[in-house]
Structures are given as structure tokens and as C-alpha cells.
Amino acid sequence: VDVEAMAKHYMRLQGRLGNEKIPLGLSGACRAIFGLPLNKDLQTSNWMLRPLTEDQIRYAASDAALLVSLYVRMGGAPFAAVVPAREVLNDTRAESDHAQGPLPG
């Protein structure tokens, strides 16, 4: 999914974006559409170490949940079991207290 193209199209339809060149990854799209960025603290944690921590599993799952929430917010078909984006974003923000350090190297 090209999150940047999808989010920019939605923002143009809402009159909130002209032709500026603003990079929007998933976190930027969440900030623009939901008002909260995605917490990226666990992005550089040690993903090779097994088993993954509960925080890492929740972090990985949040990307998929947020893509569905973005799709629904931007007028896509409703899903019966969508987790509210604000709940996912607030949950990932809480993870920063438990984030692992960067990979050694």
C-alpha cells in the first residue's frame, strides 16, 4: 500500500494539502489524519533476538491495524472489527517506556 499517495490524496480532497512535496510515511499519515504520530521507538530494537517481546509484537501489529484504520477513515469500506486508530497510537506511545536500545554494531 502506498500510504503516502493515499494520505496525500485524502488531504487534498479535504482541502488540507496543495501540491507541496511533504514526505508522509505511515507515521506522517497518522499525524496528518489522526493528529498523532506513530511511535517509532521500537523500530531499532533487536528484532533478531527471540522470542520477541510483547511490546515488539504489539508494535509490529500496530502497522497493520493503522493501515486498516487509515483506509476506513479515508472512505474505504467499513470493517466490523476495526480497532480505533487513537487506541493503537496511544498504545504504541506507551511502549516507549519499555523500548529496547538500538542494535549493537
Image: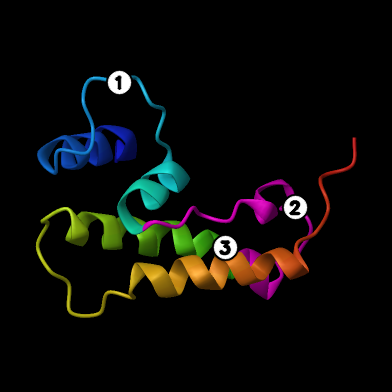
Identified at 16% across, 35% down, the residue is 12
Other-residue count near label 1 (Cα within 10 Å), few / some / many at <14 / 14–19 / ≥20: few
Q: Residue 17 appears at what percent x and percent y?
A: 23, 32
Residue 87 position, x and y percent, is 43, 75
Q: Amino acid at mark 3?
A: Tyr
Rendered-image quadrant of the N terminus: top left
Which mark is nearer the camera, 2 or 1?
1
What is the CA distance from the residue labelled 2 to the residue labelled 1? 33 Å
Which residue position is annotated with label 1? Answer: 20
Q: Is residue 59 left or right of residue 21?
A: right
* Residue drawn at point x = 77 percent, y = 52 percent: 46
Which numbered mark, 3 or 1, is in the foreground of this view? 1
Rendered residue at 59%/65% (across/down): 93
Q: Which structural element holds mark 2?
A: loop
Q: Amino acid at mark 2?
A: Ser
Horizontal side of 102 relative to 57 (left or right) equals: right
Q: Main secondary structure of the magenta part?
A: loop
Residue at image position (47%, 65%) is 89
Magenta span: 35-56
